[in-house]
Amino acid sequence: MTETATTLPEQGPIPPPDPAAGAVPPALRCTGLDYSFGTTKAVDHIDLQVGQGEAFGLLGPNGAGKTTAIRAITTLLPVPAGKIEVFGLDCATQKMRVRRMLGYVPQQLSADGGLTGRENVELFARVFDVSRSERRARVAEALSAVDLLDVADRLAATYSGGMVRRLELAQALVSAPKLLILDEPTIGLDPLARASVWECIGQVRAATGMTVLVTTHYMDEANEHCDRIALMHKGTIRAEGTPEQLRADLAAETDADLDRVSLEDVFRHHAGAGLVGGERTDEGGNFKDVRRTRAAANRVR
Ligand SMILES: Nc1ncnc2c1ncn2[C@@H]1O[C@H](COP(=O)(O)OP(=O)(O)OP(=O)(O)O)[C@@H](O)[C@H]1O
């Protein structure tokens, strides 16, 4: 991996703190967030706060409501009940200002295999209003940050799964977001490709102080890369804290030896099964979830 992330553009000024609040606003605050699809309550009155510069993991089984929560935050769903604020801006009333602060890598494929890597990133630069004078340099910087500059003029259809995921990361980074939202960024990738995606994210965070909100089913990744974690199940937040706190809380609750409690045990505990060896009481997910997950893993072919 090249040491190029530091060349990414500086982030614009973060909005001044709200004097009434008397403190710097968090990167994200959800208060009583609710979202239903017909009779299915996908997100059930959640409260969530992510500090500026934090890497925050949203974990939970298939169908827990993670993607719905994320799509509400990105303002891609109709305005939900409750309140979502991004750097102090209300998502319901200041949608366009919020969108300019966000970078989003969705679970579904967002790169076009019929375009080159560079053309894909240019498309996002135009959509996100990167000025014409800056566009060329910013596209090159984003491609460089994900180590794809050398292959930027190849069709994305010729990229490996890991390269496609890094390309999607470049698409999200080209507008210099203050909050990067990633929905299962490493799904379907081999361990080396997974590591390279996280390396890119880590380098950009170190260079820019960007806040990251990520969903993942890989507990090892959450443990290693997230400062704090929220565990979602059936639309609600069941537990929240640093990986260490969550493990310590479960060890205390079950009178288990801390060294023998993993983040996976915490996940199982809050997702409806007991500690290691326990029976699942709720499988979670449905046909749509499986089909979408597979589609995401198939990449651009
Ligand atoms: N467009 C939709 N129409 C109807 N129901 C939906 C829709 N999208 C999600 N759901 C339902 O909302 C619930 C939450 O789904 P969501 O995709 O947010 O979960 P998730 O935690 O992101 O799951 P996964 O880990 O599989 O991505 C599930 O019951 C799902 O079936």
Image (cartoon, rainbow, N blue to C red):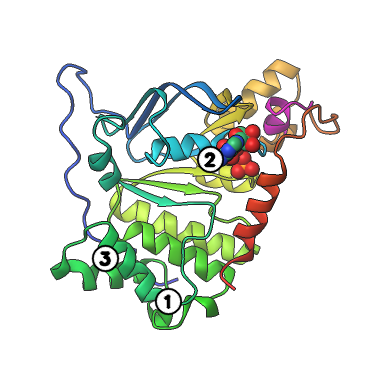
Looking at the rendering, in which quadrant would you find the C terminus? bottom right
Q: Is residue 25 above or below residue 164?
A: above
Q: In this view, does 36 lie above or below 291?
A: above
Estimate the x, y position of residue 135 in percent, counting from the top left.
21, 68
Estimate the x, y position of residue 252 in percent, counting from the top left.
68, 18
The span shown in magenta is 265-274
Q: Is residue 154 visible?
A: yes
Q: Does the residue labelled 1 lie within 8 Å of ligand 1?
A: no
Residue pictured at 58% horizontal, 48% vertical: 221
Q: In which quarter of the image is ligand 1?
A: top right
Question: In the rendered image, which quarter is residue 131 located in?
Answer: bottom left
Estimate the x, y position of residue 34 in percent, counting from the top left.
48, 23
Residue pictured at 42% horizontal, 76% vertical: 115
Q: Which amino acid does label 2 sit on?
A: Thr
Is 193 displayed left or right of 70 in the figure?
right
Badge 3 marks a residue whose secondary structure is helix
Is 147 displayed left or right of 259 in the figure?
left
Quickly name the residue at label 3: 7
Q: Which amino acid does label 3 sit on?
A: Thr
Quickly name the residue at label 1: 115
Is 166 displayed left or right of 250 in the figure?
left
Looking at the rendering, in which quadrant would you find the N terminus? bottom left
- Nearer to us: label 2 or label 3: 2
Quickly name the residue at label 2: 67
Q: Is mark 2 within 8 Å of ligand 1?
A: yes
Q: What residue type is labelled 1?
A: Leu
Earlier in the chain: of badge 3 and badge 1, it is 3
Question: Mark 2 to mark 3: distance in Å?
Answer: 31 Å
